[in-house]
Amino acid sequence: MNLTGIDAITYGVEDLKDARRFLADWGLKKVRSSAQAAVFETLDGGQVTVRPTTAKALPPAIEPGPTLREVTWGVSGRRALDALVKRLGKSFEVTLRKDGSALLTDPMGMAVGLRVQKRRKVKAAGSPANTADRVQRIDKPARVYDRAEPVGIGHVVLNVPDLAEMEAFYTGHLGFQVSDRYPGRGVFLRCRKRGGHHNLFLLQLPTGKAGLNHVAFTVRDIHEVFGGGLHVSRAGWETQIGPGRHPISSAYFWYVKNPCGGLVEYYADEDYLTEKWRPRKFQPSPELFAEWAIDGGLDGVSRRQRAAKAG
């Protein structure tokens, strides 16, 4: 389907000032800001827009309070976008916007944007790793980061009321590939045959409620995961869990509570899949979510676990 990844996301927020401060602390670059909206960017040009929940320009919310309102997917070119919109228009109501993008909604009401990709290639090399079989870093220490600068918007995780219906929409109509799954509970999807482990994870909770779980931002390497997490801790934002490591995608992570809605995640070193990959099936468990993790995070000043006792 020629989708290239997440090009932009839009939040509806209750406190625009707080949202701006958080996104700046998170490491995003402010592009513009006003009383009605603020736009930030990752290094590769992925856009994060925040607007007050009362803004008329926002698509409807899938849950009360601050939350994600739209996920915009990049398409490889104008011809590919036009063909996709024409095909989708046979089954869904698709709105063409003045900026050349298109808008529709998925089965649970999340706004899905489509536009010619605006993200750009960027040089953001991580520190080479020295392993038992390969020495890649010689006479040079690995980098220590004071804070993170997210490279791109890597994936979105949504809590969905009907997993089968949502999977059918994204795989059948938008061409997503299944990477792995929790049968009856969740499915990891990527928008290209070759790419990172997932761009979208759909999770059906026992409550059946729709909502945002989290948005994840890629960073250069595990050291930037740590540097970013410690910085947001010093800035006063609360860690949910992390640092830690996901066994299913192999990625290192750090999750932080986001005033814009849900959680946000720094992550690095995820698996890269191709058309040769065969999806696996797992039963949900704490061990599969995290091989290891620190609940509540590390204190940005002491660099020690928050829950640890002195001495």
Image (cartoon, rainbow, N blue to C red):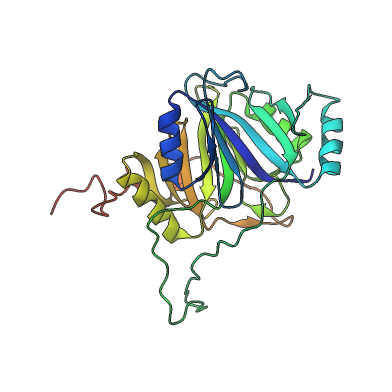
Name the residue nearer the viewer: 128 or 42. Answer: 42
How many labels, in total? Answer: 0
Q: Position of residue 215 (x, y in %)?
A: 53, 39
Name the residue nearer the viewer: 218 or 244. Answer: 218
Q: What residue is rendered at 42% in x and 30% in y? A: 17
Q: Position of residue 101 (x, y in %)?
A: 75, 33
| Above or below for 144 versus 171 | below
Please indicate, yes or no, whether residue 189 appears anywhere in the rendered image: no
Q: Quadrant of the C terminus?
A: bottom left
Q: Please indicate whether residue 45 sits to the left or right of residue 292 in the image.
A: right
Residue 194, by quadrant, is bottom right
Q: Please indicate whether residue 205 sits to the left or right of residue 60 in the image.
A: left
Name the residue nearer the viewer: 294 or 31. Answer: 31
| Above or below for 33 versus 142 | above
Q: Position of residue 126 (x, y in %)?
A: 51, 64
Q: What residue is rendered at 55% in x and 23% in y? A: 210
Q: What residue is rendered at 30% in x and 49% in y? A: 298
Name the residue nearer the viewer: 155 or 15. Answer: 15
Q: What residue is rendered at 33% in x and 45% in y? A: 233
Q: Position of residue 310 (x, y in %)?
A: 14, 50
Residue 95, by quadrant, is top right
Residue 237, by quadrant, is top left
Q: Please indicate whether residue 192 sits to the left or right of residue 270 in the image.
A: right
Q: Quadrant of the N terminus?
A: top right
Please indicate, yes or no, whether residue 104 appears anywhere in the rendered image: yes
